[in-house]
């Protein structure tokens, strides 16, 4: 009997499978995947937002903005619209006496006129300039605009909405 007992004692015993190690690995992989998905979604959402700078904000940050392309929002000043061969030239104002002279390439939208808010995509000519080179003009209006001006908004087929 002594021989049998000593044999059992010397036989190596395999440790039980460690569930904690494999579950930690699984949790780690899931955590990394969740972080990647959150980062991708947040970056996609941030890039899809279209912010604009008001005339006042842009002028206060003009040296920081330099000639970076931005969206500039302001109201078209009365008597400043001038059609050019390549687009239009006009002045947009902010609050008070702040104003920026815009030279925009391309045709302005059909609803473009004085005393309306617009957003112009473009850049300042230099970091210290009040001249803004625009590539696109977007007219801003409220959801009640069509109700107030039913004959101004035309569908592509020419009918009024």
Image: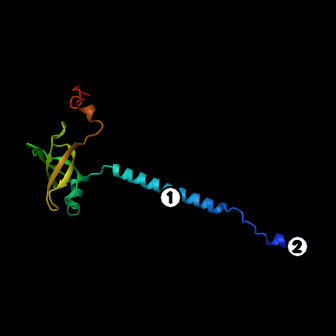
Residue 54, position as x, y percentages in the image: 24, 53
**From what the image shows, is residue 146 above or below residue 132?**
above
Which residue is farthest front?
3
Asked if marks 1 and 2 touch (Cβ < 8 Å), the reply is: no
* Residue visible at 26% across and 35% down in the picture: 145
**For residue 144, which quarter of the picture?**
top left
Label 1 environment density (alpha carbons within 10 Å; few <14, some 14–19, many ≥20)? few
Which mark lies nearer to you, 1 or 2?
2
**From what the image shows, is residue 16 above or below residue 83?**
below
The image's colour scheme reads rainbow
Tell me how far mark 1 sits from mark 2, CA to CA. Answer: 54 Å
Q: Which mark is residue 3?
A: 2
* Residue visible at 24% across and 53% down in the picture: 70
**From what the image shows, is residue 134 above or below residue 9?**
above
Please tell me whether mark 2 sits on a helix, a strand or a loop: helix
Q: Is residue 23 left or right of residue 29?
A: right
Residue 116, position as x, y percentages in the image: 20, 43
Q: Is residue 122 left or right of residue 46?
A: left
Q: Is residue 74 left or right of residue 80?
A: right
* Residue visible at 22% across and 57% down in the picture: 68
Instruction: Name the foreground residue: 126 vs 6.
Output: 6
* Residue visible at 17% across and 40% down in the picture: 112
Instruction: Name the foreground residue: 24 vs 47.
Output: 24
Please tell me whether mark 1 sits on a helix, a strand or a loop: helix
Q: Quadrant of the C terminus?
A: top left
Instruction: Name the foreground residue: 5 vs 95.
Output: 5
Which residue is under mark 1?
Answer: 32
């Amino acid at each position: 009997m002594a021989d049998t007992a000593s044999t059992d004692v010397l036989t190596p015993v395999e440790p039980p499978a460690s569930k904690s190690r494999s579950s930690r690995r699984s949790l780690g992989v899931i955590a990394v995947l969740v972080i990647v998905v959150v980062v991708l979604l947040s970056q996609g959402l941030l890039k899809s937002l279209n912010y604009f700078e008001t005339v006042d904000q842009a002028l206060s940050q003009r040296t920081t903005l330099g000639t970076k392309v931005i969206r500039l929002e302001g109201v078209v000043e009365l008597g400043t619209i001038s059609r050019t061969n390549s687009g239009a030239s006009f002045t947009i104002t902010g609050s008070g006496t702040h104003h920026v002279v815009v030279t925009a390439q391309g045709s302005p939208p059909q609803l473009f006129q004085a005393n309306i808010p617009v957003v112009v995509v473009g850049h300042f000519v230099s970091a210290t300039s009040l001249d803004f080179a625009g590539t696109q003009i977007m007219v801003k209006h409220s959801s009640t605009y069509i109700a107030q001006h039913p004959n101004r908004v035309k569908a592509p087929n020419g009918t009024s909405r």
